[in-house]
Amino acid sequence: MSNEQTHTNPNADELPTLPTDRRTGCPFDPPAELTALSDRPIRRMRYADGHIGWLVTGHAAARAILADPRFSSRYELMHMPMPMEGAPEELPPAQVGDIVGLDAPEHTRYRRLLTGKFTVRRMRQLTERVEEFTAERLDAMEQAGPGVDLVEAFAHPVPALVICELLGVPYADRERFQGHVATIFDQTAGPEAMGEAYVALLQYLNELVLAKRAEPTDDLLSDLTTSDLTDEELAGIGGLLLAAGLDTTANMLGLGTFALLSNADQLDALRADPGLAEQTVEELLRYLSVADPLPRAALEDVEVEGHLIKAGETVTVSVQGTNRDPQKFPEPDRLDIHRKATGHLAFGHGAHQCLGQQLARVEMAVAFPALFARFPTLRLAVPAEEVQLRDRSNIYGVVSLPVTWDKE
């Protein structure tokens, strides 16, 4: 199908590919080439394997597609929007428990089970623990003295501890668990080390599921053992929650801190009014859009804003593009924590909208004000242009963020 479509389109080689290069310009902005393509909310795009599909940067078009069940989330139906090192030519189906790559009715079954477990009571309990974990990490930073890598000292450990709490990882196992996780998400680790850590983590999650079945505790994984899910499904869901809830939040905390330190007027406003924390989080989610893109595959012919998307074609929703759509967000390239940024697509939209979005919001709304209150003179320890960015991942962020402060 890909070759036929390419050959029947004489201008295929002239079509844009998905721009990903952010190495020039503001580190918080989408690639300049993507911004240049945003004059049209939906357009043709050439994929890594030659497939001719679609690129969506318009907010309204993106919401329509993400909410439409005629667009599938199944990996095996999609074409990769950008080349990925080591990726197979054709994507395999989702692994057991990976609800991101499923459609209804399989997706609906998992989603109903999980949605019921993110209760108000559990969110309240986790909020208290987020506050405790945040304070513990800030204490450790203060004791270590000025000069730390904020990613290592704060941005990664806080959500990692929250995930441990959510899944019910015993305290004695947390160092082992976090060690595997840190290696998997470490862009400087080699593929062999990352692969070994991934296998070890899956093995641990399988052990954890068996332990929860034998002796349930007050956590999400234990709750799910009372359902009809198999051990393999439970371990897969644990891995999904880990992948979805840790790397994204960790990079929002790291990159968000970088963005606030680079926008002194916005940071001053947050410091002056901690009540702006929730609004700041929403604006950072919109402005940074760390999880990108969101591909879908058309199951049948669908017309979107006057464009006929044919069955079998892949559509790539650019979250960066849609969250900078001036039709939805005036002056979209300006970070403004007084903005009402509701309606952004940082957590997706429709049936696959992020399950843990409220927990992620809590983590950030607690962490940002606490960090800047504890260290009023917090600042970068290196020039901004020397901060190493994660530009080889579909989760954008900083590899490290050297910061310092004045010791009282």
Image: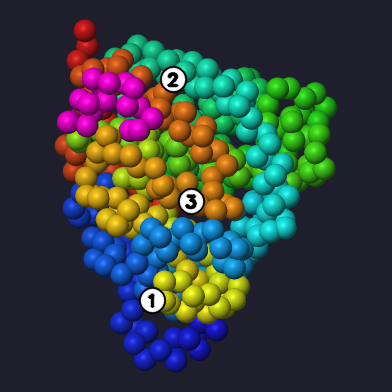
The residue at 81%/31% (across/down) is 213
Amino acid at pointer 2: Thr
Residue 209 position by quadrant = top right
The residues bearing labels 1 and 3 have C-alpha atoms spaced at a distance of 22 Å
Q: Residues within 10 Å of mark 1 (few under 14, many from 20)?
A: some
Circle 1: element type: strand
Labelled disc at residue 134: 2
Q: Residues within 10 Å of mark 3 (few under 14, many from 20)?
A: many
Q: Which residue is mark 1?
A: 44
Q: Whole-percent x and y of residue 179?
A: 53, 32
Tell me if I can see residue 281 in this picture: yes
Labelled disc at residue 80: none
Q: Which residue is mark 3?
A: 348
Magenta span: predominant SS is helix
Amino acid at pointer 1: Arg
Q: Which residues are magenta?
A: 264-280
Circle 2: element type: helix
Amino acid at pointer 3: Gly
Most foreground residue, 400 or 73? 73
Lower sequence index among marks 3 and 2: 2
The residue at 37%/84% (across/down) is 12
